[in-house]
Image (cartoon, grey):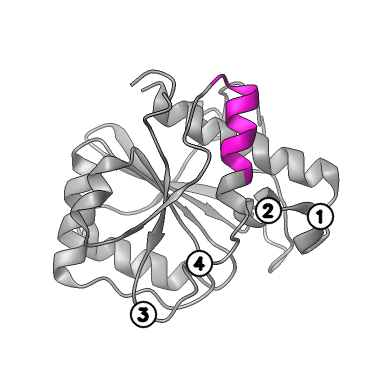
């Protein structure tokens, strides 16, 4: 796909069900700025917002989904998201704590024939410009579990990356929001940049 041009924009996924899809309002903007400064991308500095069932979803090569609560995809929305992913799109789901069971159940509607698999630490997504030899960095404690990166793989292609027990999105936000350390903030941004680079150079 090549590195992102100024015509390209990434988007936040808006979904139904009552979950706070709009959590972390500064996160994507900060990630875009970091990527444009450090990866040589020229992404639109303002992320878009796109609904699961919208035809506009096909305009965005990278879509980010987050939240703490319930997610509900209608059959039409699940079909639209499936077509988007099969057509070359990429979805990053970031568990902002409490999203896990909802995200997994709804993605099963999108890909009933696929299960999330844990990606090994040598997967290319952890080894783009920035190297994470132990997989995802731990940004927020949550339940104190080891962070895990899961994927949905369709015909050999990673179409969805799910970061669990990590909270990259919180780490991307302005430091003043969650009072993260600069080190945690940078680790989160670097891992996010790896996601962008992985998608835009495929």
Residue 151: x, y in percent?
A: 40, 45
Boundaries of the magenta span: 30-40
Mark 4 crowd level (few <14, some 14–19, many ≥20, 10 Å Cα): some
Q: CA distance from mark 4 to mark 2?
A: 13 Å
Question: What distance separates the C-alpha of mark 1 from that of mark 2?
Answer: 9 Å
Residue 146: give x, y in percent of width and height: 67, 54
Above/below status of 115 relative to 9: below
Image point (56%, 19%), residue name: 40
Find numbered disc 1 in the image and state the secondary structure of the residue it sits on: loop
Left or right: 176 in relation to 152? right
Viewed as shown, does residue 175 lie left or right of 46?
right
Q: Are marks 3 and 2 in contact (CB under 8 Å)?
A: no
Q: Are circles 1 and 2 on residues that touch, CB within 8 Å?
A: yes
Query: Does the stretch in magenta take in 39?
Result: yes
The residue tagged 2 is: 173
Residue 172 visible in the picture: yes
The quadrant where residue 182 appears:
top right
- Report which residue position mark 3 lands on: 17
As helix, strand or loop, the secondary structure at mark 3 comes to: loop
Q: Which is more N-terminal, label 3 or label 1?
A: 3
Q: Earlier in the sequence, mark 4 or mark 1?
A: 4
Is residue 121 in the magenta section? no
> Which tag, 3 or 2, sits closer to the chain's start?
3
């Amino acid at each position: 796909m090549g590195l992102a041009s100024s015509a390209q924009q990434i988007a936040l996924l808006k979904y139904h069900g009552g979950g706070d899809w709009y959590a972390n309002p500064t996160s994507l903007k900060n990630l875009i700025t970091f990527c444009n400064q450090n990866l040589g991308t020229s992404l639109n500095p303002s992320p878009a917002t796109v609904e699961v069932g919208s035809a506009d979803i096909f305009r965005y090569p990278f879509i980010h989904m987050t939240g703490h609560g319930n997610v509900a995809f209608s059959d039409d929305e699940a079909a639209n998201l499936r077509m988007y992913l099969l057509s070359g799109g990429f979805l990053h789901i970031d568990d902002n704590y409490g999203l896990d069971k909802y995200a997994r159940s709804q993605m099963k509607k999108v890909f009933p024939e696929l299960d999330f698999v844990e990606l090994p630490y040598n997967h290319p997504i952890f080894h783009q410009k920035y190297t994470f030899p132990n997989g995802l960095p731990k940004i927020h404690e949550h339940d104190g579990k080891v962070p895990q990166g899961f994927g949905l793989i369709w015909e050999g292609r990673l179409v969805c990356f799910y970061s669990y027990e990590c909270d990259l999105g919180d780490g991307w936000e302005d430091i003043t929001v969650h009072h993260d350390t600069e080190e945690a903030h940078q680790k989160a941004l670097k891992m996010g940049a790896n996601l962008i680079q992985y998608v835009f150079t495929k």
